[in-house]
Image (spheres, rainbow, N blue to C red):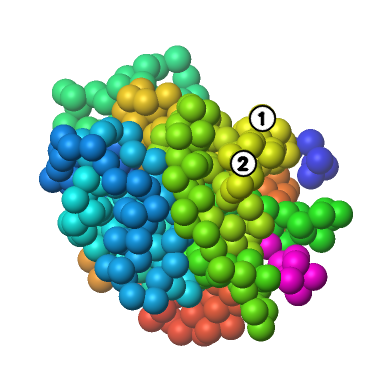
């Protein structure tokens, strides 16, 4: 019989072989991903509560005075005295007349937040930005506090989690009209069916949301995000500036550039966005200009928090920008220090299409686009991922044979379906770390693990032909 037209009896066996093959990929992807998924879901869920947690953590600085405030330049001077050798990075426009003024000062690539009583100029608190609770959670979530290496590890885990979710959708997608075990778990069929249904139902409900969160987080990573920035820079005729950073190293470079005053001779400055640019001589910054600019910026009604920044090697003029977590609401204005005139205004709608797409993705990822529903969806997805991990471990523990890992045993003469090969190749190209790790895994299995009978038995690998 022609292999192009298999018999009806052959089709179910071919489907069973493909099912078993994809099940094995799902199992091994989960084996690597589960600890990272638990970590990312937990830290991500905490970060989603930033709008509620951050004001509570800083509640002691919400009502510090009822007297008239000193000029902003005097408050800046008090903050600079509290951190010797520092420069003004940004003045945060107060949202209340009673609250402490937040002033960001920096030295090199360091960024420090100073809380100042606006009426007495008393420094209430000095804290490194990276030591603030939500920033610690941010770096735990995105880099495991390991810098670029941690970012690459998180990206690798996220890539394998994408593969795990896609294979899970294939395995657990309902193939009949039965709703029980597909849309809701069956509670009266015993523990084994309950854990199976809990895993399948949760996966079906949250997989698409989880896939969106994973994909929208990729632009932040040092590897994938860095390659995206490089490709954009190669194709662009002008310097590419992004509203997001690609890892802590990129963030430190941007802070260093913001903390470096502009060159006194503009011809000495080099056009290197995101990198610090040094010259033999820098122009002194007139911080007194902020007294003229604060009421002008307040009248512009930018979405808070609003940061007023002095000239630097990133921008030759005073600027005021919204740092709202809801990125589509952000805008930035350039100001003339002498007259206070608005020289230029940039809104989110004026950004390139790719920046707007990523901006929406980042806002949804952080639960900021349409709160509180956006936050609730993110928490629902995080709790669903935690449920998937717990149910997967329970199912594995209850079913695993003694003395082996418990991977689904392979079926003889199983060939990779062309569609599956195409999907793996496509994912390997789009997610280079995933592609490199799949190649490495295949090489290790072929040339090392299969040579050991004990390894083949424990891991559930097919014997060599």
Q: Residue at x 59, y 58 (%)?
A: 311
Q: Is 173 or 6 nearer to us in this picture?
A: 173
**In magenta stretch: residue 267:** yes
Q: Residue at x 64, y 56 (%)?
A: 315
Residue 254 position within the rendered picture, expressed as x and y whole percent measured from the top left? 55, 63
Quadrant holding the C terminus: bottom right
Please give the range of residues in magenta: 265-275
84 over 335 or under it: above or below: below
The reply to whether the C-beta atoms of the residues labelled 2 and 1 are less than 8 Å apart is no
Q: Residue at x 40, y 71 (%)?
A: 86
Q: Is 235 or 379 nearer to us in this picture?
A: 235
Residue, disc 2: 339
How far apart are the alpha carbons under marks 2 and 1?
27 Å
Quadrant holding the N terminus: top right
Q: Main secondary structure of the magenta part?
A: loop
Residue, disc 1: 349
Residue 57 position within the rendered picture, expressed as x and y whole percent measured from the top left? 18, 46
Which quadrant of the view contains residue 4? top right
371 over 405 or under it: above or below: above
């Amino acid at each position: 019989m022609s292999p192009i037209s298999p018999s009806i009896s052959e089709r179910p066996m071919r489907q069973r072989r493909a099912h078993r093959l994809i099940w094995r990929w799902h199992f091994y992807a989960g084996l690597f991903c589960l600890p990272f998924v638990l970590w990312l879901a937990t830290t991500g869920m905490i970060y989603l509560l930033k709008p509620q947690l951050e004001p509570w953590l800083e509640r002691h600085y919400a009502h510090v005075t009822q007297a008239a405030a000193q000029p902003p330049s005097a408050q800046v001077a008090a903050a600079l005295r509290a951190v010797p050798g520092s420069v003004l990075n940004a003045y945060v426009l107060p949202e209340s007349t009673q609250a402490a003024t937040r002033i960001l000062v920096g030295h090199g690539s360091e960024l420090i937040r100073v809380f100042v009583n606006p009426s007495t100029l008393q420094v209430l608190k000095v804290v490194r930005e990276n030591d603030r609770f939500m920033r610690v959670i941010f770096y735990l979530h995105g880099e495991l506090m390991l810098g670029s290496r941690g970012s690459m590890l998180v990206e690798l885990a996220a890539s394998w989690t994408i593969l795990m979710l896609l294979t899970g959708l294939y395995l657990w997608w309902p193939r009949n009209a039965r709703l029980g075990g597909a849309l809701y778990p069956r509670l009266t069929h015993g523990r084994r069916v309950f854990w199976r249904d809990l895993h399948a139902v949760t996966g079906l409900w949250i997989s698409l949301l989880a896939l969106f969160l994973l994909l929208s987080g990729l632009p932040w990573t040092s590897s994938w995000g860095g390659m995206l920035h490089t490709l954009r820079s190669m194709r662009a005729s002008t310097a590419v500036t992004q509203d997001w950073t690609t890892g802590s190293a990129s963030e430190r470079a941007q802070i260093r550039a913001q903390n470096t005053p502009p060159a006194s001779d503009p011809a000495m400055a080099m056009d290197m966005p995101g990198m610090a640019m040094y010259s033999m001589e820098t122009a002194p910054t007139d911080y007194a200009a902020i007294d003229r600019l604060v009421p002008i910026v307040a009248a512009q009604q930018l979405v808070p928090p609003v940061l007023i920044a002095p000239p630097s090697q990133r921008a030759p003029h005073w600027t005021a920008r919204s740092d709202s977590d809801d990125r589509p609401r952000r805008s930035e204005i350039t100001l003339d220090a002498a007259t206070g005139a608005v020289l230029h205004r940039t809104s989110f709608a004026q950004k390139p299409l790719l920046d707007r797409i990523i901006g929406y993705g980042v806002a949804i990822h952080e639960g900021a686009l349409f709160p509180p529903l956006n936050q609730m969806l993110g928490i629902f997805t995080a709790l669903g991922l935690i449920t998937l991990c717990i149910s997967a471990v329970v199912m594995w523990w209850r079913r695993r044979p003694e003395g082996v890992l418990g991977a689904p045993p392979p079926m003889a003469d199983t060939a990779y379906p062309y569609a599956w090969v195409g999907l793996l190749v496509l994912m390997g190209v789009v997610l280079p770390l995933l592609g490199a790790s799949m190649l490495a895994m295949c090489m290790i299995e072929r040339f090392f693990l299969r040579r050991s009978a004990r390894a083949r038995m424990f891991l559930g690998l097919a014997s060599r032909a």
